[in-house]
């Protein structure tokens, strides 16, 4: 999907500006947004194979079950045998389960920083970036707001991106996204200004957790009106289909 979007940019499909021309800012890609100083860190869980990760989870479950004093004597003996067998197998390939479990909170914090921290070199810079715009609730001062994400479908049919891969956009002029995930290229002042706002999207209430804010100077849409209508029709069809499944085929409101 992201490859498709890049192709749009390279092909130069019909674009219409919706605000006064501005001096183009530094062109950014989404990989430029995270703070590079916290992206490389030790994560022993990342080094596990899928099978080893499943075995570690199995050890946690078995230990918890035995600590709860559940089951019959025969069941508990079987659980203990399985636990010992799994722990020995992991130890045989150099996986220290107790050390791994001690690292959980530390790794969790490293991952949190990697996903939330913005690149300080971009703070306050005028930049240009392309993505998919999601309409959001207006600011208290009446200024229109949107959220920019790197892939179509994020925050509705797909999980949200990390906070440093989402931009809260304050729009100038009379343009707002006419539908969810409208492809746009935005120019404006980028600041590191973390925000969290719950809003309704296609699949329900979603926390929009954004590390950045962008005050726009220029908006370029990257899709023709016909393309937009086709995407909106496909989205409406999916909503109707989901409603039909939930109601057993009865009429459902969109």
Image (tube, rainbow, N blue to C red):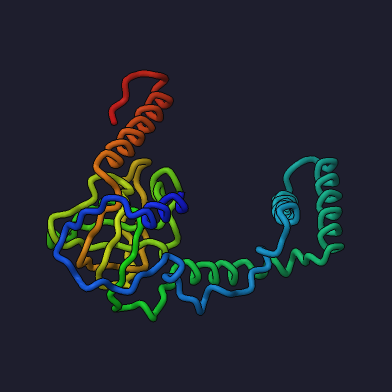
**Side of 185 relative to 165 (left or right):** left
The quadrant in which the C terminus is found is top left
Residue 207 at least partly seen: no
Q: Quadrant of residue 91?
A: bottom right
Q: Quadrant of residue 87?
A: bottom right
Tell me: residue 136, above or below residue 170: above
Residue 234 on image: x %, y % = 35, 34
Q: Name the residue rendered at 37%, 41% in the picture.
A: 203
Residue 47 on image: x %, y % = 70, 64
Tell me: residue 224, above or below residue 22: above
Residue 101 on image: x %, y % = 68, 65
Tell me: residue 153, above or below residue 130: above
**Side of 81 relative to 22 (left or right):** right
Residue 200 on image: x %, y % = 30, 46
| Of residues 26 and 77, the one drawn nearer to the viewer in this rendering | 26
Q: How many marks?
A: 0
**Side of 81 relative to 53 (left or right):** right
Residue 189 at least partly seen: yes
Q: Name the residue rendered at 38%, 69% in the picture.
A: 28
Q: Name the residue rendered at 70%, 66% in the picture.
A: 100
Residue at the limit of the structure toward the front, as seen here:
11
**Side of 7 relative to 138 (left or right):** right
| Of residues 139 and 8, the one drawn nearer to the viewer in this rendering | 8
Q: Name the residue rendered at 30%, 37% in the picture.
A: 232
């Amino acid at each position: 999907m992201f490859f498709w979007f890049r192709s749009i940019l390279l092909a130069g499909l019909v674009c219409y500006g919706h605000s006064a021309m501005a001096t183009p800012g530094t062109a950014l890609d989404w990989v430029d947004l995270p703070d590079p100083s916290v992206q490389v860190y030790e994560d022993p869980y990342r080094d596990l194979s899928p099978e080893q990760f499943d075995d570690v989870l199995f050890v946690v479950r078995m230990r918890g079950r035995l600590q709860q004093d559940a089951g019959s004597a025969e069941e508990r003996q079987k659980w203990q045998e399985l636990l010992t067998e799994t722990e020995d197998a992991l130890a045989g390939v150099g996986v220290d389960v107790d050390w791994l479990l001690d690292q959980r909170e530390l790794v969790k914090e490293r991952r949190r920083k990697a996903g939330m921290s913005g690149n300080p070199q971009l703070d306050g810079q005028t930049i240009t970036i392309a993505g998919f715009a999601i309409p959001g609730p207006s600011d208290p001062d009446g200024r229109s707001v949107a959220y920019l994400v790197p892939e179509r479908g994020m925050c509705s049919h797909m999980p949200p991106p990390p906070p440093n891969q989402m931009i809260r956009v304050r729009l100038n002029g009379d343009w707002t996204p006419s539908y969810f995930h409208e492809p746009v290229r935005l120019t404006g002042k980028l600041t590191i200004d973390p925000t969290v706002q719950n809003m309704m999207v296609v699949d329900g209430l979603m926390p929009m957790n954004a590390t950045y804010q962008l005050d726009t100077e220029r908006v370029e849409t990257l899709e023709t009106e016909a393309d937009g209508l086709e995407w909106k029709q496909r989205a409406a069809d999916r909503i109707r289909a989901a409603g039909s499944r939930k109601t057993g085929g009865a009429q459902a409101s969109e």
